[in-house]
Amino acid sequence: MSLRHILAITRKEFNHILRDRSTLILVVFTPLAMLLLMAYALTVELQHIPIAVLDYDRSATSRDFVQRIVSGNDLDLYAQVGSIAEIESLLIHGKVKAALVIDPNFSRDLLAMRGMPMQVIIDGTEPESGGFAVEHIASRAQEFANMALSTQIQMMGFSADALNPLDLRIRTWYNPGLKPRNDLIPGLISMVLGMPALSVALALAHEREHGTMEQLMATPIGRGELLVGKMIPYIVAGLVNVIILPLLAMSWFNVPFNGSFPLFFALSALFMFAVLSMGIIIGVFMKTQAAAMGVSFLMIFFPGFFLTGIFFPIVSMPEIMRLESLGMPGTHYATITRGIFLPGVGMEILWPYAIMLIILGFSFTGIAALFFRKKLG
Amino acid sequence: MTDSIITTTGLTKTFRDTHAVDALDLTINSGELFGLVGPDGAGKTTTLRLLAGLLTLSDGEATVTGYDLRKESESIKKKIGYMAQQFSLYAELTVLENLRFFAEINDVPKKEMAERTENLLQFARLTEFTNRRAGHLSGGMQKKLALACTLIHEPKILLLDEPTTGVDPISRREFWDILTNLHLEGTTTIVSTPYMDEADRCSRVGLIYEGKLVICDSPRKIKAELPGEMVEFLTSEWQKAKTLVENLPGVLEAQTYGEALHLLVEDGDKGLKQITKALTKNGIKFRGARVAPVRMEEAFISLIQRLEN
């Protein structure tokens, strides 16, 4: 390996990236654009779900309760109705997505600490909105109950902190607001950071298409020198995005970054190495940019979507796919990004994933170097 | 010890079922300017790629600058300068950056880089375009730059694949002046070309046909191989004239080049008279009737026609 050869290739490739506008856009801006686009397209952030309320109790407590339910911007009170028939009509016409029916015994039972008799009717054709309404009503109901009963509990000699009368809380860890973006965005970051792999595959195919590969093959440059020199600029470009994307996530989407950034950066570098090696393999086998593009999507992005567990949990996959997902750098990196972003874990937990990335990186580079020949046919 | 720098014996390259290069025996001596001619698809490019170590041999043996082409192709690559037919420089890099890139890849000593690039820029008359991107050069300048890039490490052998195809006549002439200079300086060059006037400027010419080396000799001797002498007539009715005279006794072969009708005859003066008479009798107007020297063009076409029959 000659450092001079590697640097010559790297410098040339940097010039290519900086001077060829389409490559520059692909390398630097596409991950950013993809993150923004996918974050908005994939986030189901429901707000202002219209609901109807049928209050049979008509007590001060039940009126307070209804006020409490619709106090946020998640649920809107569309109408107070007098009968189930009215609810049905509103649901059928799509005016409301859910309806809350308060039992005549609501306040009596609540104050007697027997429960909160009520019913939520949802539009089963729109389970997303309906489920959202149920969840939010439940959490508000519980807050309400805690508040309403706290005086009574204190009178009974307990402190309010010591006992929650109706603890039906669904506890969601690490993402208390249940904001889907908090979890989604680190996953998406791990996916869009795979983009440089496509670029490097295209860069190799570009050299083939433009005959420069033939020229290079007729020089004494070593195979490893060529591949490593080619990979370095894309690792650097990827690492620029490793800095930009978390900043974007924190400032634009308000996603917390609880872990250590140097650790994230270091592990991202490992991921770049692994995923770019995959790109190199594609570039070694594909003769044209179009083919390299197609195969990259097939091999890097689709598995990124389906196999890395960003959208579909890996545990629910058939055995064979679970094994396949282990071979994707993105699987391990998705765990790393999410782990560092939200719970803020460190190497004590992430080490196996880091090791997997190293193993994958070296295996892929090995395979690429093995099949890359300085021959045309 | 002979001073042969390239020797191939039974050099063969097969792609699926076709023999692109078929049992080629070729010896190139040090310092030769060797022209490789032949119709399209005859195997010129494959031969050059084989010699550059870009293809694996299907059969046969070859040594280039003393190295075994099968086993030591990487050592050979240090000694040769290969220029592909297609433009194959980095379009986004400037003239100077391209030169420097190939200098570094080819391990040109750092101390010598500045001087060599300077000389080559002058040599290729590209000095004033030093900072222009290669992609923005004219076709002729691109070819000269490509040549300069293949010369940067002072290779022992130059392998040039149709370097002047698609280049304007003036750039073509300039390019060949450069090649002739290199030849005079002692560089061994193998150049493939579709232009017969270029073949005429080589010290030796090899004609490849269907992957085989059909003839390999100096242009003078190849032309002398042609039987008889050549007479030329200029006529606008060349089609009619050709059918009329090509079967006359003493006429060996007829070729047309635009308005020029070139006939190979057994005896120049006799043929000139005989054909003049025949054309006049049939009312075909012509001018410029003369006994003309045989060019590589006629020799090449005559050879190919004989091979095809």
Image: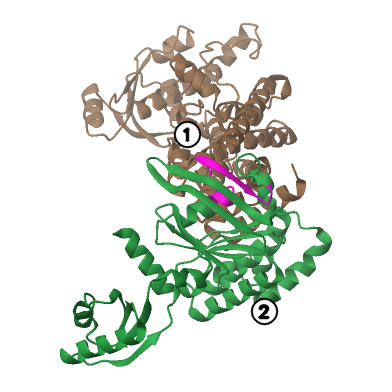
Chain colours: A brown, B green
From which residue to which does the magenta span run? B49-66
Could you say which is closer to the camera, residue B16 or residue A136? Answer: B16
Number of residues whose C-alpha sits closer than 10 Å to that of mark 1, classed few (under 14), some (14–19) or many (20 or more) = some
Could you say where residue A320 lies in the image, as x and y percent from the top left? 45, 17
Could you say which is closer to the camera, residue B29 or residue A96? Answer: B29
Q: Is residue B56 magenta?
A: yes
Residues under numbered marks 1 and 2 in contact, where contact means CB atoms less than 8 Å apart: no
Residue linked to disc 1: A299
The local secondary structure at tag 1 comes to helix
Above or below residue A4? Residue A81 is above
Could you say where residue B231 lies in the image, as x and y percent from the top left? 35, 83
Above or below residue A311? Residue B66 is below
The local secondary structure at tag 2 comes to helix
Residue linked to disc 2: B128
Task: Name the amino acid type tagged 2.
Answer: Glu
From this viewpoint, which residue is outermost toward the right?
Answer: B111
Residue at point 40%, 20% (across, down): A59
Task: Name the amino acid type tagged 1.
Answer: Met
Task: Classify residue A359 as left or right of residue A95.
Answer: right
Task: Classify residue B242 as left or right of residue A282.
Answer: left
Task: Classify residue A341 as left or right of residue A87.
Answer: right
Could you say which is closer to the camera, residue B97 or residue A241? Answer: B97
Could you say where residue B189 lies in the image, as x and y percent from the top left? 61, 63
Mark 1 and mark 2: span between their CA atoms? 47 Å
Q: Is residue A214 magenta?
A: no
Q: Quadrant of the N terminus of chain A?
A: top right
